[in-house]
Amino acid sequence: MRTKQTALGAALAALAVLCAMFATSASAAPAWKFEGKALEGSEVVMGGAFESALTIPGLTTKCENFLYKLSIKNESGTGKGELTEMPLYNCTTNSSACLVNTIGAEALPYPSHLATFGTANYVIIEKVKVGIRYKGEECALGGILVSVTGSAGGEVNNTTEIATFNSTTLSASKTELKALSQKIEWSGVFPTEAFQWHREQALSVS
Amino acid sequence: MAQRTGAKRLLASLAKTASARALLALAVAALCLFAGCGGGSGDSADSSAASQDQAAASPEGGGEAGATQGGAATEPDKAASGEGTKNAATPNGSSPSTSPSGHGSRLPQPKGAPEKAPTPQEVANSTVADMALQSPAIVATGGELGHLASTYTCDGKDSWPQLQWSGVPAGTAELALYLMNIQPVEGKLFVDWAVAGLDPSLTAIDAGELPKGAITATNSFGKRGYSVCPQSGETYMFILYALPQRLSPSQGFEPRDFRQEILAISRNAGLLPTVYERG
C-alpha cells in the first residue's frame, strides 16, 4: 500500500516538473505587451522612420519617411503579426541621373513574429518584396525594375519603443534582404506605437 | 481499509493495473493543464474572451489605422484630433501629445503623397532584373560590392572579365551586354562597353574574348571596345539584356541610342554591380 502511494507521489512530482518545464519554455517566446500586460486580442501598431535607406548594390535609395502598419496579436504566448501596409515617401537615389519612378511593397501582407536572439528581442518581418523602378535617360538603371526580397529583423527597445533595423540587427536576427542576388542593407529607426485599442499605452516586447 | 474515503478506494483500485496507472497519469496531466500550469503567458486562453471584451468596447467603425495616403499620411492628424481611432483606455480620445504618460504620437508626418508602388501593368512593361549575371572575378562580400581587379581596367589589360549568366527567358532572340558608370559624366550616361548580337543560347563569355557574331559599340571614350578608366573611384554596372527580337546594330553603334531601343522591347535583364578604386 505504502509502495503504491509512493509511486503515485513520484508520478505526480514528475508531472509537476514536466509542467513547470513546459511553462518555462512557453514563456521564453516574446509577446506583445501594453503597459506591461500581454496583449489580448489584436491591435494595430504603426512604425515610422524619419529617414530610411535601402542600398541597392551600386545605388543607394533613400526615403524621407518610411512607415509600416502592423496588425499584431499573441498566439500561444508568442507575438505574431502581419505587415499590411508600408508606404514610402520622397525617395531619392545617390545618382544625379537616377530618379525613383515607382517604389513600394508588393505581395502584401507580410507575416511577422517576435523572436529573441541573445538578450535582445526582435520583430521579424518575413516574405518582404519591395519593387523599385528607376527612371532617367542618363541613368544606367533607368527603366529597370529591381526587387528587394527576403526577411528583416528589427531590434525592439522597450524603453524607447523604437524598432531599429540595420545590418547589425538583420545579422543578429539571422535575416537578410537581397537584391540582384546580393545581400543588401536597409537601415531605419522606427518609433512604434498603437493606433487602435491601446493608443497612448507603453508598448513593449518580452 | 474501512477508513478509506471513496476517492482513495477508487484510486487504490485503479492503481492495481499498469494501464490503470497510465490512465491516472493522463487524468492528472489533463487536470494539470486545465489548471494552467503549462500555459505560458496564458494569452491564448484569454484571448477569445479578451477579443469579446474588446469587441464590446469597440467603437462603431473601429477606427483602424491606415498607413497609405489618407491613412498613415493623415493618421497622426487623426490621432492628434482624436478622430479616426478610439481607444478603450482613452475613451475621450484625448490627444496623444497631451497624454500624462507621455506616450504621444512620435511618428513622422510625411509631406506629400506616398510613392507609387509598381502596378502590375508597369511590372509587365518594365525591364525586370530577374536574370542572374555573375563573374568569378567580381565577388561581393557581405553587403560590400565586388571589386573590379585592376587588370580589367586601364591600369591593367583593360579588357572584360569572364561573365556568366542564367535565367535567359524562352523566346529570346539576342543578348546585349553593357558596362556603364552609375554616376553620369558631365550629366551624360557613360557607357564603357556595349556588345550586341550575342546568341541567346550563350551562358558565358570568357575574359577578353567575344563569340562570333558579337557586335561592339563605340564607347563613351570614343573607342570601339572596352575601357574602364576612372579618375579616382567609380561604381559600375554590368547589365545583360534579353531581347525578344533581333535588333542587329552595325559595328561601332552608338550605345546610348541603342539602349533606348533595347529598353523599349526588353523585359528581362541581369545586373552585376562592381566598384573600382584606383591606387
Image (tube, grey):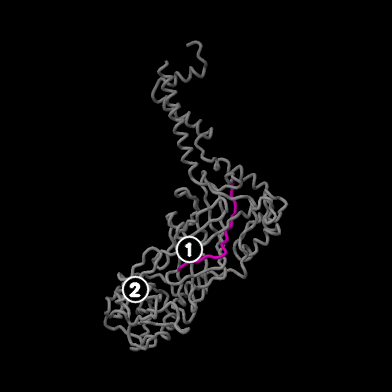
- Callout 1: chain: A
Residue plotted at (65% across, 48% down): B55
Residue wearing tag 2: B148
Secondary structure found at label 1: strand
Establish if B138 lies above or below A78: below
Q: Position of residue B43 (x, y in %)?
A: 55, 42
Please indicate whether residue B137 sits to the left or right of residue B79 in the image: left
- Callout 2: chain: B
Secondary structure found at label 2: loop
Q: Main secondary structure of the magenta part?
A: strand
Q: Amino acid at mark 2?
A: Leu
Please indicate whether residue A102 sits to the left or right of residue B61 in the image: left
* In front: label 1 or label 2: 2
> Mark on residue B61?
none
Q: Position of residue B126 (x, y in %)?
A: 46, 75
Residue in front for this viewpoint, B160 or B33 = B160
**In this view, which residue lies farthest toward the top?**
B2
CB contact under 8 Å: marks 1 and 2 = no
Residue wearing tag 1: A186
Q: Magenta span has A45?
A: yes
Tally of numbered tags: 2
Q: Position of residue A124 (x, y in %)?
A: 48, 54
Q: Magenta span has A133?
A: no
Please indicate whether residue A192 sits to the left or right of residue A175 in the image: right
Q: Amino acid at mark 1?
A: Trp
Residue plotted at (60% across, 64% down): B68
Q: Position of residue A146 (x, y in %)?
A: 45, 70
Establish if B88 lies above or below B27: below
Mark 2, other Cα within 10 Å: few <14 / some 14–19 / many ≥20: many
- What span is in magenta? A40-55
